[in-house]
Image (tube, grey):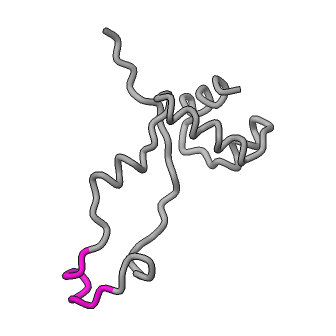
Amino acid sequence: MLNQVLQEIKFAQSALKLSDLSHKLGVERSALDGMIQFLVRKGRLRNDDEDLAAETTICSPPSCGGSCTGMAVCPFVVQIPKTYSIPDQKSD
């Protein structure tokens, strides 16, 4: 089943929703999420959100004119869907 998950992600033409992939593979969404997390820990999938978080700064008080309310209630912060990709395979 883990290989099927990898194959679906690898050959997807566009982003896949977790709910669509779980339906296609015939597994519960929570079980699929666990499989994906396992594949990330094993280095078979890359969590693209970690790369994005390391490269961006979301909140900056000067941009709000010094009246920053914090990220939890900021009207300019949006929740971006989680994305995963297959890491580049380096052959030595």
Q: How many marks?
A: 0
| Residue 66 within the magenta-colored segment of the rendering | yes
| Residue 6 within the magenta-colored segment of the rendering | no
Query: Residue reaching furthest top?
Result: 92
Quarter containing the C terminus: top left
Give the x, y percent position of residue 71.
39, 76
Q: Which quadrant would residue 64 be assigned to in this image?
A: bottom left
Q: Is residue 34 above or below residue 58?
A: above
Query: Which of the pair 5/20 is nearer the observer?
Result: 5
Give the x, y percent position of residue 50.
39, 48
Q: Which quadrant would residue 91 be assigned to in this image?
A: top left
Query: Which of the pair 37/89 is nearer the observer?
Result: 37
Give the x, y percent position of residue 68.
30, 85
Q: Which quadrant would residue 12 be assigned to in this image?
A: top right
Q: Residue at x 71, y 26 (%)?
A: 1
Query: Residue reaching furthest right?
Result: 26
Where are the magenta residues, as a range?
60-68
Is 52 on the left-hand or right-hand side of 37?
left
Give the x, y percent position of residue 24.
75, 38
